[in-house]
Amino acid sequence: MRLEWLHTFIDVSETRNFNRTAERLQITQSTVSSRIRALEEELDINLFIRGRGGATLTPEGIRLLSYAKSIRMTWNLALGELKGPKNYRGSVKIAAQISIWEQLVSEWLTGVRKALPKIAINMEAYYSNHMMEELRLGNLDIGVLYAPEYQSNIEVEHLFNEKFVMIATQPMKISQVNQENYIFLGLTNYFKERHSELLPHLQSAAVSMGLSVMSLEYLKANGGASYFSQRQAQKMINKKEIFIVEGAPIIEQPVFVTYLSKHRHSLVVTEILNVLRTLM
């Protein structure tokens, strides 16, 4: 049995479409079919029910899926350990939520490199759900995000609280902010709940966005007010490019660090986590 068969099987289980898997893996549809057929012959079972609606896992296919993902995760972990960069005593792959990757790169990564110069680091930016999946599959060592999913094999630790302040393109008071000139930031469910408690009259704004960088660009082009990370906004505030809205409450969004439970005693992961905690 070949690993590429399992990889293709896992992908088809997600797409439920041989053609879509072929596009994602950049292979031909006939190659996808031959790999699935070879795996079925090897195991002497049918893995998918083919139909007009796509490919649906059989009961046997459902049972195989968790084993296949486990095998892929173990293989990826082995590759990471055995094929790490030369002249380094270890390597680690870290991902940050897209909304906070800038400060992770500019501040934390610099600190980690200074404290641990012999550790090779691969940095990525993901959305929360993608990050949790990559962690579970063993393709990621450490994730820094706003909204983790609590799973039995993944450790979740509170890292710090990110402060968000309401900013505007010109000096104004909270009484001057209304649904027409306000951009609602739907960062996470937690953020939305806190916002609803503190500013219920602004919950249904004319414009809503999911990323703070998007709201900032919109503000610069059209004016108005919105919430933004205080840490990232401070330089612009000092230059008087933007202004803190007088009387607007600060909203604190928890930031978490996640990693596989089996890495709890990994020296490399432990050292990275210690540096992250120190920098916060």
Image: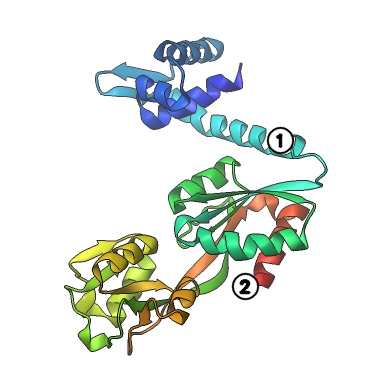
Q: Which residue is mark 2?
A: 280
> Which amino acid, mark 1?
Ala
Q: Is residue 123 above or below residue 187?
A: above
| Mark number displayed over residue 225 | none
* Proximity of marks 1 and 2: CB atoms separated by less than 8 Å: no
Q: Is residue 29 above or below residue 85?
A: above
Q: Position of residue 74 (x, y in %)?
A: 65, 35
Q: Is residue 58 visible?
A: no
Q: How is the image coloured?
A: rainbow
Mark 1 surroundings within 10 Å by alpha-carbon count, few (fewer than 14), some (14 through 19), many (20 or more): few
Q: Which residue is mark 1?
A: 78
The reply, left or right, for residue 25 in relation to residue 68 is left
Give the secondary structure at mark 2.
loop
Give the secondary structure at mark 1.
helix
Mark 1 and mark 2: span between their CA atoms? Answer: 31 Å
Q: Position of residue 70 (x, y in %)?
A: 59, 35
The reply, left or right, for residue 162 in relation to residue 73 is left
